[in-house]
Amino acid sequence: MPKGTVAIDQERCKGCGLCIAFCPEDVLAYSAEYNRSGYNVVYMKEPERCIGCAFCAQTCPDIAIEVYRERKPRQR
Amino acid sequence: MSVNADKMVRVFERPRSLTDAQFSYCPGCHHGLVTRIVAQTIDELGIQDRTVIVAPVGCAVTMYEWFRCDGIQAAHGRACAVATGIKRVNPNLIVFTYQGDGDLAAIGTAESIHAANRGENITVVFINNQIYGMTGGQMAPTTLVGQRTTSCPDGRNAQLAGYPIRFAEMIAQLDAPVYVTRQALYDQKRIMAASRAIKKAFQCQVEGKGYSLVEVLTNCPTNWRMSPAQSNSHLMDEVVRAFPLGDLVDRD
């Protein structure tokens, strides 16, 4: 499995939870934080499990998530 | 959060044809998804400099502020008529309308049907969330029988208010449309299929083939009184039974 990571824009996140529901590896969860708009934002609870599949980003209605995946050796 | 650029490659980012403005949609609304998919399509086809948005009246009314494209906001329901004018004056432009069910299937029924019947070379993105979202959740022509809204609190009564309009099927009866399809966004597979459908609809216009309509079944968590995850389940279990998914016309 490739390794991945996501960058969540905390101010764009509206805390709808669709990314949490779509993540196949249960990486994401609600944090204890609230953003300036008062939304309970999402964070990477288990970052080591992320495979960079981008399901979370593709379902995020506010494009708050950017996804990164580890380069394959030949891409280096 | 910092990402090591030497080791990691970015696989998903914000489409270039969108501005930095935050969408005004409610949390979990599929409108944002469709807007993102349209923007991604514009990026992929490289048509940002010649795309014109015709924004509707409804939740997407300020759509032109989110795209780095030209845009105009049409009178309620008249988006297809406005798009016709723009496209006929300058056929080199890529013109699309983005309309909800109140805009396209209620007040704009005449304009929408006749634009399709004339086979105008435009792309229509039809957001069907079975409710009037922006005005507070009233019954729309597409509201399911039995569905509760603020103007039918006991559920839609077919004896009184008729049955949900299947707009894509109506358009599919006509001879002119090139591509008519109905899509949904309740799971990953459907999101990918909807992305391909929207790209194909734009491609039809770029190639000068004619009218295309993509009806997207979306949610309205706020007015359905559901969580976004529940609204996805409702779409999958209930809504697709009234509105079957798939391509209805493909003369591409």
Image: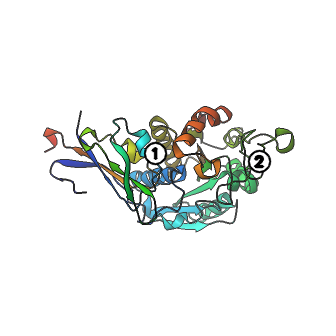
Q: Where is B184 relative to B94, above or below?
A: above
Residue B93 placement, left or right of B113:
left
Quarter of the figure that contains the N terminus of chain B: bottom left
Label disc, if present, on residue B153 of the rendered structure: 2
- Mark identifier at residue B113: none
Residue sitting nearer the eye, B104 or A30: A30
**Label 1: few (<14), some (14–19) or many (≥20) C-alpha neighbours in 10 Å:** many
Q: Is residue B121 visible?
A: no
Three-letter code, disc 2: Pro
Residue A1: in sight, yes or no?
yes
* Percent coordinates x, y for residue B196 in the rendering: 47, 41
Callout 1: helix, strand or loop?
helix
Q: Please tell me which residue lies in front, B111 or B21.
A: B21
Query: As displayed, is residue B177 above or below residue B31?
Result: above
What kind of residue is marked 1? Leu
* Pointers 1 and 2 within a single chain: no
Identify the residue position indicated by label 1 in the image.
A18
Circle 2 crowding by C-alpha within 10 Å: few under 14, some 14–19, many from 20:
few
Residue depicted at x 51% and y 46%? B198
Kindly identify which chain the residue marked by label 1 belongs to.
A
Q: Residue B85 location, x and y as percent? A: 64, 64
Q: Residue at x 64, y 37 (%)?
A: B239
